[in-house]
Amino acid sequence: MKSTGKTHWERFYAAVASGDDEQAEALIPLLSPSDEPRLLGIVLRGGESRWWGVRGLAAVGRSAAISAVVACLQDPDAAVRAGAALALGQLFSRQPEETAPFLPFLAPLLADDDGLVRQTAGDSLAQCGDAAVDTLADALNSPHEGVRVRAAAALHRIGSMATAAPLYHHLEDPNPLVRHYAFETLDKLGLLTNVLLMRE
């Protein structure tokens, strides 16, 4: 990328301000944690550029970004909600202890009106591994079939022993996809034979 004499932040901000999405995206990997306060400023000011603030926080944010990202999970713009769901998962990868208490805020997005938001919320919870199991286990008890399917899919992707108990209780779920994920996960863990023997 050709040098312009400007900092990475200045070039990123100029690209966002001018609507050059391709350039802004290319500069995201060049941002650093020191840019977190300025990214938070973009988010907190609101406006159309707030998505880019959330996108930047997904890449370089730390614990100071958590509350702003969680607030964006309820943004009226679906793209911002999806970006915030992605960001929370990325924040967990860098700041797991500080982020873990906020993972339940992703659960309502499993029933979001927007498909990308629903998918991103499920992906982020799956990315958080065992720390998200309790949140996903609660979602498995939802009367909303889509929520149960996405929760079961995320638990299947985690695939640890911690997922066995919640999925076991949904081996006879009314939804065939939930049953599928439950059986597949228990089988992968080597527990399905034991479950079947227990039921005989």
Image (cartoon, rainbow, N blue to C red):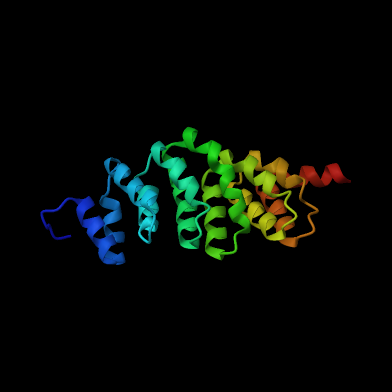
Q: Is residue 41 left or right of residue 156?
A: left
Tell me if 15 is positioned left or right of 121 in this view. left
Q: Residue furthest right?
A: 200
**Which residue sits at x=59%, y=43%?**
104
Give me the residue at 29% from left, 46% from top. Answer: 38
Q: Residue at x 36, y 57 (%)?
A: 52
Where residue 168 appears, as percent x and y from the top left, is: 75, 45
Image position, residue 138 (x, y; %) = 69, 44
* Front one among 121 and 163: 121
Instruction: Report the front residue among 166 and 15.
Output: 15
Quadrant of residue 2 within the rendered picture: bottom left
What is the residue that sits farthest to the left in this orientation? Answer: 5
- Is residue 153 something that shows in the picture? yes
Looking at the image, residue 58 sits to the left or right of residue 160; the answer is left
Q: Position of residue 50 (x, y in %)?
A: 38, 56
Is residue 189 visible in the rendered image? The answer is: no
Q: Position of residue 93 (x, y in %)?
A: 44, 41
Q: Left of 48 or right of it: where is 5?
A: left
**At 64% across and 38% down in the image, what residue appears?**
162
Reply above or below: 140 against 17. above
Considering every residue shown, the one lying at the far top of the view is 97
Q: How many circles with numbers are drawn on the protein?
A: 0
Rendered-image quadrant of the N terminus: bottom left
